[in-house]
Amino acid sequence: MKSLSLEQWEDKYVPGTIDRFDQKNTMFIRPAWDESIKSQLENWSFVGEVKDKAGYTLQDIAFRWAVRHGVNMGLFNTSKPNVAPLNTAINEILSDPKLGERFIRYRHPDGMKVEVNDPERMTRDIKKAALYYGASIVGVCRLDRRFVYSHSFSGGANEIPPEYEYAVVMGYEEEYDLLKYYPTYIADAAASAGYSRMAITNAYLSEFIRGMGYGAIDCTTNDVALTIPLAMRAGLGDIGRHGLLISWKYGPRLRLSKVITDLPLVADEPVDFGVTEFCESCKKCAKLCPSQAMTMDTKRTTDVHNVSNAPGALKWPIDAEKCRMYWGRMGKPCTVCISVCPFNKDMSGWFHRLVRWSVDHARWADPVYVKLDDWFGYGKPKKADHFWEEWDPQRGH
């Protein structure tokens, strides 16, 4: 792995001007206003259908939905720009001069503040806190405002106060063993748990920062800004052909969140460990994508498929409409591209660590590793018939 300067990162990923992206065009929000999309979705709720089939039973679907319950904490998140409170109770709280103080967005209400004489030490402390609160990995970057949404779907221009200069970006591991059971609800539980963990972790970390007298904007998943470019700038990984962040330790098995703050910190550097070059050769996620939403082109492009692609950066653009339509037809999310990615490995073994290291140092071997990945059967779905007998949630802990 080698560090990139911001100039090198710019040359590699952002060759031209980037126009700020409007949040309403994300594929998860478009069905709320775009009838051409909404009318084609068969199951917008993702509730799913109980079946008399292993992996799809009531116990399985309850397993998936239970671990997503923590997302409800987001209903009380009022720190985002142009926030539109989701219920009357929150409106009443915010309009009450006394109660509203508890929900002040950017400043500690009593003005107390920890003096930060050593930003490097504070950065260390913030990272330790983030890991303790539930993150698997964490990095810091300066807030690149080109990747802040131009507008918030809930209303108005999406402007962040100028003193908010940093983003603490966190990743949450998805359980390796669960992802093997794609395309069942069991595999979906791995992602659902990540979303719930990030809601809790973000809330804790934001309150920690506010308790020290600084501002914190709690941004779970893709709120406020595009998360993957910020994660890349924070040194958490690189973007893959499937449009997901690939980290050194967890590959694409990550959900991402960030907290934007005015707390003085020290930014990490972007990293490069051969992901782009490997994805040029691999194409496994594109071949196995059920919706064929991924390109087989070798080289990246700044071209886009539709308004759900943010333009300007070099990448393999995903046809988000095809992907999301497939989710609608299935009545559930899809984890195929994560599960089949050769970077999706349990890194506790020495052999996989050696291969990961060599991917960064031996470009000629990339096609060989893809073949080995197939020969050893990685990425093949595992039958769910005996999941509850075989699964050990404490494995590796």
Image (cartoon, rainbow, N blue to C red):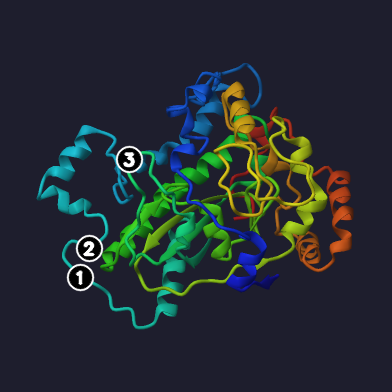
Circles 3 and 2 in contact, beta carbons < 8 Å: no
User: Horizontal and vertical percent for residue 292?
Assistant: 72, 33
Image: 242 above or below 57 = below
- Residue wearing tag 1: 112
- Residue wearing tag 2: 108
Disc 3 element:
loop
Q: Would residue 371 be found to the left or right of residue 117 on screen?
A: right
Image: 254 above or below 208 = above
User: Are there few (<14), some (14-19), or many (20+) residues within 10 Å of tag 2?
Assistant: many
**Which is more foreground, mark 3 or mark 1?**
3
Q: Amino acid at mark 2?
A: His
Circles 2 and 1 in contact, beta carbons < 8 Å: yes
Which residue is at the far bottom?
117
Instruction: Determine the residue positioned at 58% across, 32% down.
Output: 333
Q: Nearer the viewer, residue 11 or 340?
A: 11
Instruction: Determine the residue positioned at 68% across, 66% down.
Output: 272
- Residue wearing tag 3: 155
